[in-house]
Amino acid sequence: MQSDPFVRIDRIDVTGTSLECTVRPSPSMRRFFTGEPFRARYDVEIEDVPDGVLAIPVLAQVCPVAWTQGADVYVDEVDTTFAHALEDAETALRSLYPEFMLGGDLQVRETVDVAPDSSGDDSASGLLFTGGVDSTCSLVRHREEAPTLISVRGWTVRPDPVDDGKWADLRSRVTRVADRRDLEASFVESNMLATLDNPMLLAHFGHRVDGGWYSSVGHGLGLLGLCAPLAYARGLENLYVAATHWEGVDLEWGSRPEIDDHVRWAGTQCHHDGYELTRQERIDAIAAFVRETGDDLELQTCNDRMDGNCSACEKCYRTMVGLRLSGLDPNDHGYRFADADYADLRRSFERGEWVLGEDERIMWADIRDRVRETEPRSPVERAFFAWLEEVDLEDLVADAEPPLSHRLLRATARNAPHGVYNALYPAWTAAKVGTRRLGLR
């Protein structure tokens, strides 16, 4: 007899390249799940992938939610190596979030020592890839391994039709990057964030983390675990996810070394890559690669579009200045930039045109450290550097606290019985505050 709270993972059905299963929460856990089955689709056949590996994608999404309530998670079968990985991930998340991570047990009918697929290349590797600074740096660092570039639809690019164009742009761009370098590209689609009730997760935990549930808690374990059937089918021994932050940066972020480096399953070890490098040092690594090879690689970092860079948002400006500081011309790598843009950048900061947080403050502080070591190449650049050295970056970070009406809705959602919450859900959804940082950087 299962005692509340718990979450039950029902039988996983596989057809060709797709899997589906039902997530069945106990009454007290229902508010955190929508009732929609978990689905994932790959670009390789997964019917021959063992059941113990097929369970990993859904467990990677569900377990962190269950741990917040001290709930056990029930599943019929799982790979023994991943079961141990979940224990390590739980320990890491409880250490990071002791105020709301209570832990819970994985209740498995059978743990199986799944043998790695021996038909592939034991040295094969994969890299979660967006084309941004971080994942491009990881590609440069591991290019001798010829990693498969893996892109995911389900987080920053949603699985509903409104984002079909963005997904097409992402697939096209990643495929071009892979083809030019004789690499494989692979694509994963999932509704993982439609299975979880994100408004309710935000209502309960948004005031305790700096951002949304998936960005602050779930995406390291979640994205890596989502790739398990693909990694098994392709025989990937190593799977890399690029670091967003670096040593000494203490921000709440769901992808961290103490989480990602523990994620593993039959034949595959995951790695949080590039954590020893600041963002500017990662651009340095890209610049060194460009000078060594003559590769005119383009970056995709824009906050506003997927089919190129707008060259006008904060993240584009941040990347363009970083490229200049590393000795590259942004115009050669997917941007439009001239000295006159320094004045526009400063004005945008001073007028508060962007909602910025601690994350952005730290990255501009990293740029400022490099500015202090760099000789300006023009009077306009010199003026901007002088301003950046003197400005109080704390003053540029806007207070992102949601309005009182939204905070009251959160409190109501946290405390309402499930039936009452269902009646309030449309109003809450209409007023919810989205996560400020959606992208893998």
Image (spheres, rainbow, N blue to C red):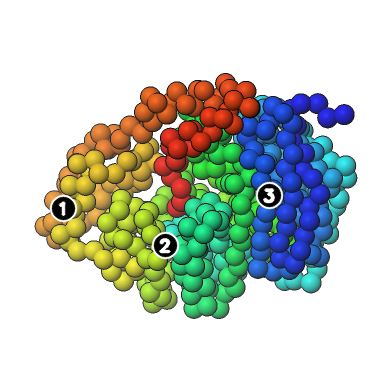
Locate residue 129, reporting x and y percent. 52, 61
Would residue 119 be found to the left or right of residue 346 on screen?
right
The residue positioned 54% from the left and 26% from the top of the image is 413
CA separation in Å, label 1 and label 2:
26 Å
Depth check, mark 1 against mark 2: the one in front is 2
Looking at the picture, tell me which residue is in the foreground, 10 or 228. Answer: 10
What secondary structure is found at the residue carrying circle 2? loop
Q: Which comes before the other along the chain, label 3 or label 1?
A: 3
Q: Which comes before the other along the chain, label 3 or label 2?
A: 3
Residue with the mark numbered 2 = 306
CA separation in Å, label 3 and label 2:
26 Å
Residues marked 3 and 2 touching at CB (< 8 Å): no
Residue with the mark numbered 3 = 38
Looking at the picture, tell me which residue is in the foreground, 293 or 101. Answer: 101
CA separation in Å, label 3 and label 1:
48 Å
Q: Amino acid at mark 3?
A: Phe
The residue positioned 46% from the left and 64% from the top of the image is 165
- Which mark, residue 343? 1
Q: Which comes before the other along the chain, label 1 or label 2?
A: 2
Q: Amino acid at mark 1?
A: Ala
The image quadrant where one finds the N terminus is top right
- Which mark, residue 397? none
Res. 88 visible in picture:
no
Residue 105 image-quadrant placement: top right
Instruction: Give the crowd class for mark 1: few <14, some 14-19, many >=20 residues within 10 Å.
Output: few
